[in-house]
Amino acid sequence: MLIIGETYKTARYKKLTWFRLSLSFFLIYASVYGGTVSLFTENMIMRSTKEFFLVLLIVYAFWDFLLTKDKQQSIVKTLLFFILLFITIIGSLGVLESGDWVSYAYGIKITILPMSAIFIGFLLKKYDVKIDKTLLFIYVLIILGWVVQYNLGLDRLLAMGFEYGVNVKHFNSNILRLPSLVGAPDAYAFLLCILGISLETSDSFSNRKMTKWLIKGTTLLFLLLATIRSAILLWTICQAFLFFRSVRILPAKKQLLLLSFGSFVVAIVPIALLFFLSKSTLASSSSFKERLSHWSDYLQSVFTSEGLIGYGLGTVGAASRRISELGYQSYDYAVDNQYIAFYEQIGMIGCLLLILLAMIIVKNILINNQVYLKFSLVILPLFVGTLISCYFTNVLEIYPFNVIFWVMIGYGMGNYPIIHDDVKGEYK
């Protein structure tokens, strides 16, 4: 019921102060852990802190839904919970034969826990909690970290403890890929991408066009400098969706003008790209050809037990690479294709559950786009762009991009009425 006596905004923020602070701490710590903390300490407490906070936040989200008897989208939340539960169970079946429970534990840590963060997004939407300042802080921090590393150079970074081929890499033997504070070049680029997209579409900058364009330009510049093409692809797809979505809500004359300009850009950009990229290492297809050469290494037939339930969570992808680094026996197979990675881990049954999950997500985002247009403006493009990028990289295993991604998906799905500050009370 609605309790009168205190503005909704004040009551809401008092109730969730510790939650917002914990979430902010977790996001900042997760963003700097791989490239700073993990390089200088082997302390297990420090290493497990981020997982502890993530589990705590997810459990609190469930507790809040139960405590407040929140029936909003209860069927959707129940379906999401059981889909994740069944994926976890299916991911354990393939491990029963091999007994590789260490890989399974890492698979849950790298895949299932971040996906469960979708419920944190629901909670943020329920109470209209903003984390823009935290995201902006991380955005500035990782860009500054990249600039500092660029000026230090490769030799200094290696002397500090960065590992070549893991933290620091070369692109086509002549361009240095840096990890910033995140720990790996891919992780830095995807984190930069999702932060830039989130900030430029945030309500905090809705009336600051210059700030939005500054964020857009800065994000593109540092994505190009990072040379992670799958992250650039994700950013480009989101920008295209956002452009045509913004045109749709304009008056007819402006729509025609901008669509004409957009058509001109679409016609001229491929020609310009062919001219410039033909002389740039960004156009190199060697890494893509290398991916194609090994995608079928562990690809099992659909008509086998492995094809139905997979080899088990964590047996390939980021978890298997991490297990190998720790000295355990594993395939040590990156895959570089999220769909093949999922199929090899959880089989066709698990992939069908993921398709169901995607359908539920798209349906609810589309519903919210009609009801709360500006609140879900970026979510669908982000989801579609990520699905496309998954063809080239294990995007949903890239940390902490995957956590922020699922939080944003949950926020975009949450169908909660926005109560203005002049409405008093809080939900009990």
Image: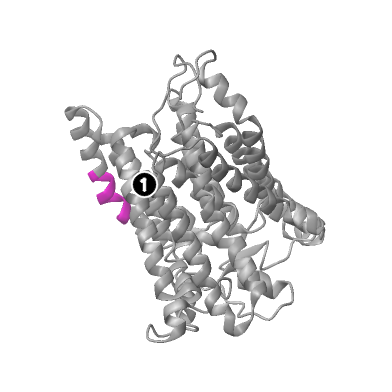
Question: Magenta-highlighted stretch: main secondary structure?
Answer: helix
Seen from the viewer's position, the closer of residues 132 and 36 is: 132
Q: How many marks?
A: 1
The residue at the point 53 percent across, 77 percent down is 93
Q: Is residue 315 above or below residue 218?
A: below
Color scheme of the displayed model:
one colour
Seen from the viewer's position, the closer of residues 258 and 404 is: 404
Query: Is residue 161 rendered to the left or right of residue 260?
Result: right
For badge 1, the amino acid type reads Leu
Can I make out residue 225 in this image? no
Query: Is residue 106 rendered to the left or right of residue 387?
Result: right
The residue at the point 50 percent across, 62 percent down is 85
Q: Secondary structure at mark 1?
A: helix
The residue under label 1 is 380
Coordinates of residue 251 in the picture (x, y in percent): 20, 27
Taking the magenta stretch, the answer to whether it contains residue 173 is: no
Seen from the viewer's position, the closer of residues 210 and 364 is: 364
Coordinates of residue 115 in the picture (x, y in percent): 51, 55
- How dense is the environment of label 1, judged by Cα within 10 Å: few (below 14), some, or many (20 and up)? many
What's drawn in magenta, residue-wise? 263-271
The residue at the point 67 percent across, 54 percent down is 51
Seen from the viewer's position, the closer of residues 79 and 267 is: 79
The residue at the point 34 percent across, 50 percent down is 362
Coordinates of residue 180 in the picture (x, y in percent): 66, 51
Coordinates of residue 52 in the picture (x, y in percent): 69, 51
Taking the magenta stretch, the answer to whether it contains residue 270 is: yes
Query: Is residue 325 rendered to the left or right of residue 66?
Result: right
Can I make out residue 267 in this image? yes
